Image (cartoon, rainbow, N blue to C red):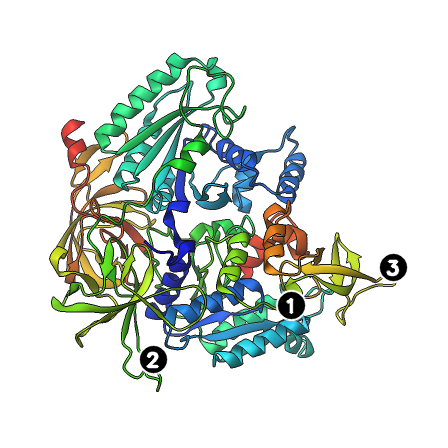
Amino acid sequence: MESEAVHIFREVAGEFEKPVILFSGGKDSIVMLHLALKAFAPAPVPFALLHVDTGHNFPEVLAYRDRAVARHGLRLHVASVQEYIDAGILQERPDGTRNPLQTLPLTEAIQRLGFDAVFGGGRRDEEKARAKERVFSLRDEFSQWDPRRQGPELWQLYNGRHAPGEHVRVFPLSNWTELDVWQYIAREGIELPEIYFAHEREVFWRGGMWLTAGEWGGPKDTEPVERRLIRYRTVGDMSCTGAVDSDSADLDAVIAEIAVSRLTERGATRADDKLSEAAMEDRKREGYF
Amino acid sequence: MDDVDDVDDTTTTLRFATAGSVDDGKSTLVGRLLHDSKSVLADQLEAVEAASARRGRDAPDLALLTDGLRAEREQGITIDVAYRYFATARRRFILADTPGHVQYTRNMVTGASTADLAVVLVDARNGVIEQTRRHAAVAALLRVPHVVLAVNKMDLVDYRESVFAEIAEEFTAYACALGIPEITAIPVSALAGDNVVEPSAHMDWYGGPTVLEHLETVPVGDALTAPARFPVQYVIRPQTSEHRDYRGYAGQIASGVLRVGEAVTVFPSGRTSVIEAIDALRPGLGPLTAVDTAWAPQSVTLRLRDEVDVSRGDLIAPAAAAPATTQDVTATVCHVADRPLKPGQRVLLKHTTRTVKAIVREIPSRLALDDLSQHPDPGKLSANDIGRVVLRTGEPLALDAYADSRATGSFLLIDPSDGTTLTAGMAGEAFTETERTV
């Protein structure tokens, strides 16, 4: 699995002009960065990072991002949702969630900066539309994904050819599961943002999960705030990423917790995927990662 | 062997593909495998129950677990390969769930290209049908090492041993003629749960493993006995003060074992050198660790004793067991694109990490999967056709026969105008034995 992911990183380095790693500060993108560091050692990673900043990030995650960039001498590009809202190009949604608003800043940054390959941390075990996605996923000049027009992916012969203006999304962790990611983090001794481990935090209940209070529009008067022992299973926009009750304070405890969990990570903690049966597929068609 | 890269221990992962006709109950079998091995989580099951209720079904439709696209759910069919992941205490599994329609032969080829094992389903009431023969032929063509024949719907034939024995015998004879090395036949009822995960209480006459037991115990990973092949992916030259003279050739070992001190030849140039060092992936981000030996499918970095010219697309192989190089390629291909392939067409050929120009010289025959007969001079190959092709490449390739190596005997043909993958190729003779026996 590690060898396969490293193989994918090296294929992209060999075939593309200007790749970039999408980096959210979540565990999957942290594992991707770690694999990229190993793939090219002792040389530096030959790619920059691109962070889509929703404006509603967890401060611990932003701090982690900046430390990682400094430690490994990387270049960081930021696509800011807040700037698009301030400029009147995007409008805040009534529910306050900014996850769907990431697509436009992301796709425009890819076009503007001329990236021809964009690494994402998506895994096929996350969601049923993602189970259909190729390791190399061609996107048209509007960054759209068309599941019916995907070329077959045969052996380990990834075809990265594309027309000018198109780009390829690359998913080196396609064949990993959530448990694989955690076991790899433990084996490699990879540091993670603290919000992945149990800590006490002010939260309120909405839509079947615990959300962190913040400037993005929560809680309402009818949503009482409680102090609870929780941790995050995924890291995304604060407005739609829920926490789970947990006393897992270290890696071993987290792995034990995931191994017996009866909920998928997205089912447990992502509000945006619950919008409809095809929410992820629809967002991916638009250019979401 | 030591514990380098234990996450990559291939004996603990089985990649397998499923194939079956439209109503053979393939989705039910996959659903049963996932459900009974407790790989379906509560929220996924709830989503399936809710969606089934919205459609007015009495019971949860387990096919909704695997049909991920809007169009698939609307039509109630599977139109594309989906990958599923599950694990037991003994092994982790990557399942390529491939659609059974004949027009999606390319999808089965996609799933089978990386599979260690294929599960072919038949309906016990219908026995071996044309579609079964096609699935067996594709598995044989792609050199899938193990094939399981799942004789499904045994509950509908009163669990009779004679029905199973007759189908198993017919299929095994056919599959042996195709050259499939190992066939295991299992009588199951996916709907009732007989012999999928739990042994059946209805078939005392059957003493073999359940489907899951077999998947857990079948041996995988025979790439180590083949000669070593190392396609160079990327040249690592840090040019920093700390590593001023470092020059490493990064890649994934396609087959065999590489050792420090071994004499090697670089293709296509034919220059020779000796492996000076092998830098392997080790746990953590510490300094690189040199190892004495590395084997497929590890990703490693080689350093050579001499300053020979090596770049992406070259192939490093032991001087004692080197491949031949050629510009004339004969292959069996599966055409995967909607636009046809014709003699005289100019294409790109991607083989390992090397992409060269090529021209389609001839298409001598097209294979009819129904009866495995060769139709001479078809004039073109259309989507999902399998045929023989003769190519001339612009540069020499170090190509093995697909029969000897799935990794270095396979290639893609690509449309140079827009990069579309046109054709999946398998170098060398294939089905020659079949042509004699059928």
Badge 3 vs badge 1, beta-carbon distance below 8 Å: no
**Callout 3 environment at 10 Å: few (<14), some (14 to 19), or many (20+)?**
few
Q: In which image quadrant can residue B36 be found? A: top right
| Chain ID at mark 2 | B
- Front one among B369 and B273: B273
Residue at left offset 27%, top offset 82%: B245
Q: CA distance from mark 3 to mark 1?
A: 29 Å
Is residue B341 at all visible to an observer of this figure?
yes
Residue at left offset 66%, top offset 75%: A82
Please give left or right for residue B429 compared with residue A16 in the image. left
Q: How many marks?
A: 3
User: Percent position (x, y) of residue A227?
Assistant: 81, 62
Amino acid carrying mark 3 in the image: Thr
- According to the image, label 3 marks what residue? A222
| Chain ID at mark 3 | A
Amino acid carrying mark 1 in the image: Glu
- According to the image, label 1 marks what residue? A194
| Disc sitting over residue B238 in the figure | 2
Residue at left offset 48%, top offset 54%: A176
